[in-house]
Amino acid sequence: MSDQTVRPSRHHVWRIALRTLGKSWDDSIFAESAQAGFWSALSTPPLLLGMLGSLAYVAPLFGPDALPSIEKSAISAAHSLFSSSVVNEIIEPTVRDITAHARGEVVSLGFLLSLWAGSSAISAFVDSVVEAHDQTPLRHPVRQRLFALFLYVVGLVCAVVAAPVLVVGPRTVAEHIPDALANVLRYGYYPALILGLILGVVILYRVSLPEPLPTHRLLYGAVLATAVFVIATLGLRIYLRWITSTGYTYGALSTPIAFLLFAFFGGFAIMLGAELNAAIQEEFPAPRTHAHRLRKWLFSRSPALKRTAEALSNPMTTNPATQDRSGEPAERPT
């Protein structure tokens, strides 16, 4: 037998596409996307409260006009993704209101509660990615919810640190470079935005899985998710612009419905990309990552550490109340 790796062919691509569609349907991609979209919409105010409230303390270190510049850049970025009605009626008023009162909210109990509420969207995305890869039994639900909260806090800290640099940095660089190179910064905005989306999705896929795949194997799903989200948002913006021009709208509900549709397509894109990665993994299994090999080596050296990790991942298997006299997990009554 040959040890050479089988190269993907047209037949494999077709089979992976069918497997992706089949897995998406079996995992109820529309219901999961709606759930992720709902929690994303519900988590937007807590997310803005946490980020802008923290920036009220950090941004002045970069200059007196840093916070207004960040606010303006956030609204401008929202215009690139969402329709004008969503930005003008939901996002922009929320951003301006939170910016005006967020500094005092950071030290309040409401800010701590906003961390839990804001992490609900991350939790929905993590659940979807884990379910797509059939790794749900590998992590306890409570532990996974706390893990999503940890990811949210880490992401919030990174956003607070990176936002002033991303806003003030290009402007400072543009003041010290020739005008010919300034166009590079201007026209490189959208490519940088797309690359940033791909990188963010790859990181989400990488950290969500209890047994993660190699990073390069996650690029396929990340590229698909970004492409689906960009195409869906562009199509939705064109549709909303057309339906508004005809005079047929949903009245006061049109803007919230549009925002929920954007959030739905975001969840749909992320889950579809995860299903593609899972289908590729089933068709062409990837070798274990270095972290998994290190963990396996540590467990082989320390059985007690292995038992502790298994107890944390699945407490039901180590709870004496759930075991019979033979030491096996007791069956639940039906």
Image (cartoon, helix red, strand yellow):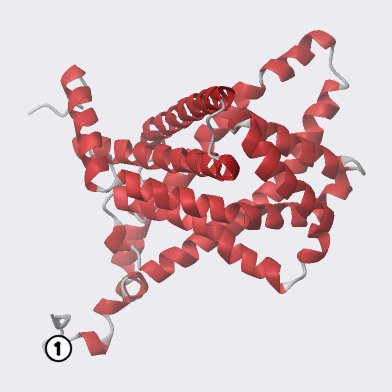
- Which residue is denoted by mark 1 in the rendering? 324
Closer to the camera, 233 or 105?
Answer: 233
Closer to the camera, 304 or 174?
Answer: 174
Quadrant showing the C terminus: bottom left
From the viewer's perspective, is residue 224 above or below residue 297?
above
Closer to the camera, 73 or 13?
Answer: 73
From the viewer's perspective, is residue 169 above or below residue 119?
above
Q: Label 1 neighbourhood size at 10 Å, few (<14), some (14-19), many (20+)?
A: few
Closer to the camera, 276 or 95?
Answer: 95
Q: Residue furthest front?
A: 247
User: Residue at coordinates 83% horizontally, 48% vertically from top-left?
Assistant: 59
User: Residue at coordinates 77% horizontally, 65% vertically from top-left?
Assistant: 105
Note whether residue 158 is visible.
yes
Q: Say left or right for 92 vs 11.
A: right
Position in image of residue 244 (x %, y %): 57, 27
Q: Say left or right for 278 vs 260.
A: left
Q: Say left or right for 59 vs 245.
A: right
Position in image of residue 233 (x %, y %): 51, 30
Quadrant showing the N terminus: top left
Position in image of residue 304 (x %, y %): 33, 76
- Location of residue 269 (image quadrant): top left
User: Residue at coordinates 67% horizontally, 54% vertically from top-left?
Assistant: 157
Q: How many marks?
A: 1
Q: Residue furthest right?
A: 64
Q: Say left or right for 66 vs 275.
A: right
